[in-house]
Amino acid sequence: MNNIILIGFMGAGKTTAGKLLAQESGMDFVDTDDRITAWQGRSIPDIFAEHGEGFFRDLETELLKMMQEDTSHAVISVGGGMPVRAENREFLRSLGCVVYLTAEKETILGRVKSDGSRPMLAGDSLERRVERLMEERENCYRQAAHLCVRTDRRSVRQVVQIIRQETRRYLDIDPAIEKNG
Ligand code: S3P
C-alpha cells in the first residue's frame, strides 16, 4: 500500500514531521494515538491507568488490522511502542514505506521532559527510563523500517524534504516485487 509510516521513539518528531509531510504531499494525516483515543473515547493516559499497558498494546494491534482495510495514501504517525511487537512490524510494513525517525537521547530528553501525557515516561528518573527504552527498542525500529532519517540538528522542513526524496522510490512498489529484490 502507498502510505508513508513514521516510527520512532517518543519525541522523535513523528507527528510534527508527519503533519507537514502530509500537507506538502497532498496526503491524509493519521496519528495512531488519535485514532485509539477517538475509538475508545478516552485519553491514552486514562487507557493506561484503567486497563494497563497490555490492553493498550492489544488496541494498537487491532488498529493496525483495521488500517489494512481503511487507510491508504496517508502519512501515518505511529505511537512509539507500536513496533515492539513482531506482528505489528509486519502490519506496519504491509501498509507502505516505513521510515524510522532517529534522534539522540539528549534530543529526545529535551523534547519530552515537560510533557506529562506519556505514561511510559511517568515517574522518577526520566533519563534512565528513556535510555533503557531506547536501547530495548532500537532493534525493533530497525527491523520494521525500510529507511532511517536522522532528525538531530535538522529542521522539520529539512526532515520532511529528505523523507519525500527517499520514499519516492518505495511508494507504489508491489510488496512482492520488493521482497524478491
Ligand atoms: C508510547 C508512545 C506514545 C503513546 C503511548 C505509548 C510508547 O506515542 O503511543 O503513550 O510506548 O512509546 P508517541 O510516540 O507519539 O509519544
Image (cartoon, rainbow, N blue to C red):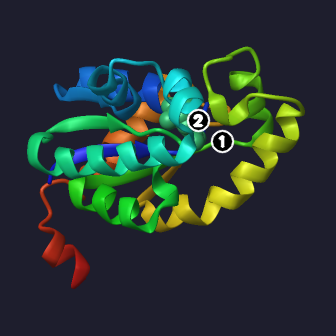
Q: Quadrant of residue 33?
A: top left
Residue 46 location, x and y as percent?
52, 22
Q: Quadrant of residue 32?
A: top left
The Cα atoms of the two marked residues, 1 and 2, are separated by 6 Å
Considering the numbered disc 1 on the image, is that residue within a helix, a strand or a loop?
Answer: loop
* Label ID, residue 12: 2
Residue drawn where x is 60% and y is 35% of the image: 10
Residue 147 location, x and y as percent?
43, 57
Disc 1 crowd, CA 10 A, few/some/many (<14, 14-19, 20+): many
Residue hosting label 1:
103
Q: Is residue 133 left or right of residue 27?
A: right
Residue drawn where x is 16% and y is 49% of the image: 2
Mark 1 and mark 2 lie on one chain; the one further toward the N terminus is 2
* 145 versus 109 height, above or below: below
Residue drawn where x is 52% and y is 48% of the image: 54
Q: Is residue 101 left or right of residue 98?
A: right
Which of these two is toward me, 57 or 146?
Answer: 57
Q: Confirm whether residue 150 shows in the render.
A: no
Disc 2 crowd, CA 10 A, few/some/many (<14, 14-19, 20+): many
Q: Amino acid at mark 2?
A: Ala
